[in-house]
Amino acid sequence: MNKAFTREDSATEQDDEEPRLPELPPGSKNYITPAGYARLRDELKALIERDRPQVVEIVSWAASNGDRSENGDYIYGKKRLREIDRRIRFLTKRLDLAEVVDPSRQHGNTQVFFGATVRYVEDNGAERRVTIVGADEVDLECGHISWVSPVARALLKAREGDVVSLPTPGGVLQIEVVDVRYPAP
């Protein structure tokens, strides 16, 4: 079939799909650190107060130029506006579900809870350091893992010196908790 006779709505429908929310255990809350909450809130504020009005202005100007079917500024602007609106809906939902947990309240504790920075050694001798954060704050390059990840779930409630089992596709891995730290209040 010639491309001229296909519906363009299917591309638009795909653009309007909201990003999937990271999976949380049923009945659990969306825990997040104060810094993560502030980052999401600041991004939402910037989208609403700065980015969206700029794009609306461009689209309005482009629409006033006449023929919209071949107007690149109008077409791109409308697409960008859909992206911004989708991100605003996503951030609004995530912030509504968020439960802010301050890890500095655990300062001095040697047991692993949300917000802990944990140094552990795998049974093969590899040493790793991870910080357990909310699903919206994951950054593997910085060692920030979600509290619902398999590693975090294995580490939660363990204490310094404990050896815990981590099920992996290659078999069960034994990891020893070497150090547990929380940010200072």
Image (cartoon, rainbow, N blue to C red):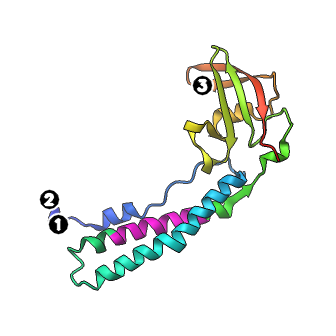
Secondary-structure class at tag 1: helix
* 99 shown above or below 123: below
109 is within the stretch colored magenta: no
> For this view, does 21 lie left or right of residue 104?
left
The answer to whether mark 2 and mark 1 are in CB contact below 8 A is yes
> For this view, does 49 lie left or right of residue 64?
right
Location of mark 1 (residue): 5
Residue sitting at the far top? 124
Between the C-alphas of marks 2 and 1, the distance is 7 Å
Q: Position of residue 116 (x, y in %)?
A: 75, 38
Between the C-alphas of marks 1 and 3, the distance is 49 Å
The answer to whether mark 2 and mark 3 are in CB contact below 8 A is no
Residue displayed at 66% across by 33% down: 130
> For this view, does 163 lie left or right of residue 140?
right
Q: Position of residue 125 (x, y in %)?
A: 65, 14
Q: Report the label total.
A: 3
Residue displayed at 84% across by 47% down: 105
Location of mark 2 (residue): 1
Near mark 2 (Cα within 10 A), the count class, few <14, some 14-19 or many ≥20, is few
Of 98 and 4, the residue lying toward us: 98
Residue displayed at 75% across by 43% down: 114
Work out which quarter of the rendered image holds the N terminus and state it: bottom left
Check disc 1 and give the amino acid type.
Answer: Phe
Residue 5 visible (yes or no)? yes
